[in-house]
Every structure is written in structure tokens, then in C-alpha cells.
Image (cartoon, coloured by chain):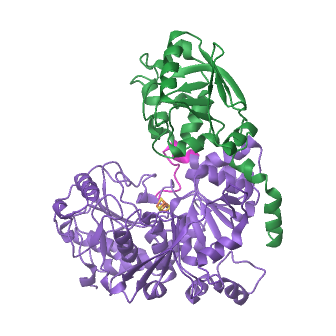
Amino acid sequence: MQPFTQLTGIVAPLEALNVDTDQIIPKQFLKRIERTGYGPMLFFDWRYLADEKTPNPDFEMNAPRYQGASILLSKDNFGCGSSREHAPWALENYGIRCILAPSFADIFYYNCFNNGILPVKVASETVDQLFAEVRASEGYQLTVDLEALRIVKPDGSTIAFEIHPFLRERLLNGWDQIGLTLRHEDKISAYEKARAIA
Amino acid sequence: MAKTIYQKIWDAHEVYTPAGEDPILYIDRHYAHEVTSAQAFEGLRLAGRKVRHPELTFAVMDHNIPTKDRDKPIADVLSRAQIEALRNNCAEFGIECFDMFDERNGVVHVVGPELGLTLPGMTIVCGDSHTATHGAFGALAHGIGTSEVEHVLATQTLLQKPSKTMEVRVSGKLGAGVTAKDVVLAIIGKIGTAGGTGYVIEFTGEVIRALTMEGRMTVCNMAIEAGARAGLVSPDEKTFAYLRGRRYLPANKSFDALSAEWAQWASDAACSYDTVVELRGEDIEPQVTWGTSPGMVTGVSGHVPVLAEIADANTRLAAKNALAYVGLAEGLPITDIKINKMFIGSCTNGRLEDLRAAAKVAKGHQVDPSIELAIVVPGSYAVKKEAEAEGLDTIFREAGFEWRDPGCSMCLAMNDDRLNPGDRCASTSNRNFEGRQGKDSRTHLVGPAMAAAAAIAGHFVDVRNWDYK
Ligand code: SF4
């Protein structure tokens, strides 16, 4: 998994509450066998017109100024619904490495850490203010610094955030669950030896 | 200190618990199928990781495979791709795969026990919630997600929080015509679909002891429908007798030595559980679900609920929505529910004993003209072969049932075996969720004899009064 230390990138606004995993990636794409390639299916039903090809001009993220965004700004309860890991896969494939929102659904939140994405809880008023600033200046970028636990705005001012120390360590080191367990590989080998598992 | 089987298995498999993190549990057996494994293999590939113990994983394709004309190419490209991906991944990572024409093929939870791959005291996982089935052998078996599948492949372990224990004791004796399926549906009806959440259930009592291994598998299979992480039964002489001579038993020990080891896993007589639930076998009649969750169930002599009689507001609302979906009137006697399709099969009820019970009912009768489709899908090729050796296929065919090749089939309708909108099906599977067997279709869960009887009568009947010929 890609480590996450510091990221500077364009911020895309997705002004909706309760963005659920069905909206992040609709269920018709779950029969695929790949873990990658879900980027074009991200927000499928919002992003395209009825012909399923033409970008929907009313979907704000489609605007040219937000192309290449790596930070997503959204509202409360982001990622609710099913536990499908296709949701973080789609975000990551699209290029999103960090999501700023006032709150996240539980399973989605932890799924992010298995996929190199940093979900940051930011106070509601701050999020509202960020929406305004993002829209006010084209090319608006933020720097998210996981080591220093702060977000740096274009004017140099900062927003501090918190995260569970262990989750922070995992992302900083790029440890997925497997990586974590493999820190204890010696224990697994010893266990296997004791049970004579070759 | 006296321990439950769950505690014994846990203690024997806990590798290490890092401070502030979840325990690492060793996994003895991993089963894989085509729907939930592809991304896990791709994850390994992307990370440049190997499968730690390819010899401890066995793969089988079952969810997508056709149950007829299997020699023809599969029309659905996505299904075909999932099957091919499993075949290729197994070849690449050195995993034994029971391909769709292999004599060992069948539904993963039917095949594992049949081959002697599932043994008492094991930890068993599969990217499939009905992995609980293997608990019938006194194994700690549960379903996992795709990231966890990858984790198991890479490390042969799983990060897992300990569960609480629940004893579900079924005492006394079952009446004639009452089966394992009725027992487990009655249990779910009693504790509810979330009643087992956070627990591992151990099924105990004379009724469970008296069940065959096949019956115990049916009960454990649906532990997940009660919300439990896993369900298990302590091993006994029946367990050992079932396993004798199975193909994949460890070759380095005598059967007596193995049985002696297996016997150690059984719960100690003086052990205690966090929760105990009791049922009496005598109180259980053949069960039929009327709604859209396995807990919406009643005895065959009962009726669809009357909403005003349901005290709890949330339960009432759920029942109301379910009745709107299934299109049944309040208070309708269960035996007045007419069906137009029937499915016998799945990892719940696709084993030989199930087919025997259904064939016994079908013998000398004819499927009602109102039935548009009645299919019998054996759980595995081995089951199919044994059933054919006993002439069960002939009985089914003569009675108007279709006899198919093994697979998950209409249990979840990922292949072509699917209900149409508005269809009403008597099904021996385990889930009656909205759309499970096809968009806007209605499913009633029953045991195999009840399903066969319903197909012959055109509506549900009490199989205890059946006219056997
Ligand atoms: S038969 Fe049904 S429940 Fe069993 S593994 Fe197949 S799809 Fe799942």
C-alpha cells in the first residue's frame, strides 16, 4: 500500500450529505474481477448522463477546474451503506487520496486505511468555509500533512486535525493489514514450528 | 478450568496479540470460490506477495456455474471471466482447484466436509458467509471479506476479536416429519436474525445429538442468519464415523489416533456460556417463512401474521413492508399459499439425505400443473452420483422435477437459474431477502420434503400428513 505522509493537491467539492457506497460505486460493477480500473465508475449515476457516457455538466466535480483533484471535500456521514471495498478502490483509482468531511461511516472509514486513503474529520463550519474558498478561486489547493497533523491553506493558515495514533502510523508507513501482521512474522513462524506446519 | 469448544479452538490458534491491537488467529483451512477471491489474488500480485501456504487453501467454482448444458460456453461474459480468473489464479499461486468438471466439484460448503478437508478443532474461513456450515464438525468456521481473504492468503492468519458464546440447547425429540431445517428456522424465529450478533453459537441437546452430520450442517449453515459469527456442534462418534475413509484425511496418523485427538475438542461438561437459549424438540413443527428475512417464519399450521397483533412498532413496520413485497394477505393460512416454482438444493439442503427425503415425498406423485419450474440441484457431483446410484433422479424425473448438475444455482441466482418478477418459490436455500432469487421474486424457505410436497400440491401442505407411495 502507498504510504501517506504529505499531500498537496486540487480540492474537488462534493456538496452532499450521506454519500453512500451505492452512489460511490453502483452495484452493477461488483461482478468485475479486478481491484483496479474502478475510477471511471466512481459516482457513476451522478457523473454521467442517461447515455452512461456523456459527462453530466451539472455534476460539479466534472468541471475542468477540478480535474486531477486528489482531495475530496464533502459533508456528514460520508461512505454510509454497504461494506463493499469497491468504494475506496474507486476513489483511489480516480486519484482521491484524502477526503475531508465532518463525519464518516464506520466501515468505510476503516476501509480507507486498508487502501491508502486518509479520511480527515474537519468541523462542519470549517468544511462550509472550505467549500466557499474552493469555489472562489480556481486551482485552489490544500496541503494535508499527516506527520504534523495539519492542513495548510493557500494563505499559509492551518487547520489542525486528530487521528488515532495507530491508524496514523499505519498510513505513514503504508502498512495495510497484511503489512501489520507481517511485523509479527516471527511469531507466526514460531507458531507453525510448534505445530509442525511445514 | 472447564472450557467450551470455542475457547479450546481459540486458545489453540491464537498466535499473538500485539498490545492495543486485535489478536492474530491462525487459520488451518481456507476455501475460495470465484466471486470473492479475484481481487484478493490481484492484491497479492500488486504487492508482490506470495501465498504463504498454498496447500492449506482449496478452491472451487460454484456460484456462477450453469447447472445444465455445462459443456457449452457460458453466455454471461462476467460470470465466465470470474470462473476463468479463479482457474488462472489457482494455477499461478499453486492452489488446488476443483474445476467445474472435476468429480470433486460442488458447492464449497458441501464439498469441504465430503472430502474430509473440514475436521474437528480447525479454524476455517472462506469469503462466504455460509462458511458456518463447517461448524457441524466442531470447527470454528466463519465468512470473511475480500481484504481478509487476501490477508489469509498472505499470512495464513486472520485479525479477529474474540466473540461471546451462546448455547442453543434443543432438548427432547423431534416429531416425525420434522427436520434439521425446521429446527434452525425455529431457532431463528425465536432469537431473531440479530439474536446471535457478537456470539458464536454452540448447538447442544438431545435433538442436535440425534441429528445426522448432514442435519447438523444444515443447522450450522444458518447460524449466520441468526446473526452469529459462527455456529458449531461438539464432535462425537457420529462426526468420526462420517469422516472415516474421507479422501483428504491426514495420512500420517491412524484413524483411531485422529478420532482420539478430535474428541478432545468437545466442550467440557462443566463449561459455561455467556447466554443460553432453550427449545424443546416436541414444540417444533415444519417451518415456512412468510416474509423477507429468515426470522419471518412460522409453523406450517400457522398463518401469515396480522399486523395489529404485533406489539413492537419496528417489527410491525418490517412485517408490513415484507407483506407488501411478498404480496400476501394478513392472516392467510400458510397452507393456502400457492407457489409456481420450486428449488431443492444449496449448501443448506443439497446433500444426499435432503434429496432422499424429497424423493420419498415425490415418489409416485406428479408435480402440480400450476408449477412452472421445479428443479433439484445436488450440492456436489458426489451427491449427484450417489443419488443416481439410488435411483433418486428417476423418481424426480418421473414426478416432473428437473434433475440438474451441482452448483449454487437458484440459491442466489448468479447463473441462469433465476426467478422472474412475481414468481413465488418454495426453496430449500437459506435467504429469502428481497430479490435474492431474482428481481421482484418471492421466496419461502422450507425443508426438502416440504418443498417437494408443495410442488406436488401447488401450495404448502403439512408434510406430516403426506400420502407416501
Ligand atoms: S448455495 Fe447459496 S448460500 Fe451456499 S454458498 Fe452457494 S450461494 Fe452461498
Task: For residue B423, say whether it is visible.
Answer: no
Residue visible at 59% across and 14% down in the picture? A140
Which chain is drawn using green? A
In this view of the protein, which residue sits in the foreground, A134 or B63? A134
A89 lies above or below B326: above
Q: Is A121 left, or right, of A45 in this rendering?
A: right
Q: Is residue B83 magenta?
A: no
Residue B351, x across and y down, in percent: 48, 74
Q: Main secondary structure of the magenta part?
A: loop
Q: Is residue B174 left or right of residue B45?
A: left
Whether A59 is drawn above or below B212: the answer is above
Q: List x then y, in percent, for residue B26.
A: 70, 65
Residue A168 rendering spot, x and y as whole percentages: 69, 39
Measuring 47% from the left and 68% from the top, which residue is drawn there? B223
The chain letter of the purple chain reads B
Magenta-drawn segment: B67-81
Image quadrant for the N terminus of chain B? bottom right
* Quarter location, residue B356: bottom left
Q: Within the image, what quadrant is residue B279 found in? A: bottom left
Residue B72 is inside the magenta segment: yes
In percent of width and height, residue B352 lies at 47, 77
For this rendering, which residue is in front, B152 or A155?
A: A155
On screen, B345 above or below A7? below
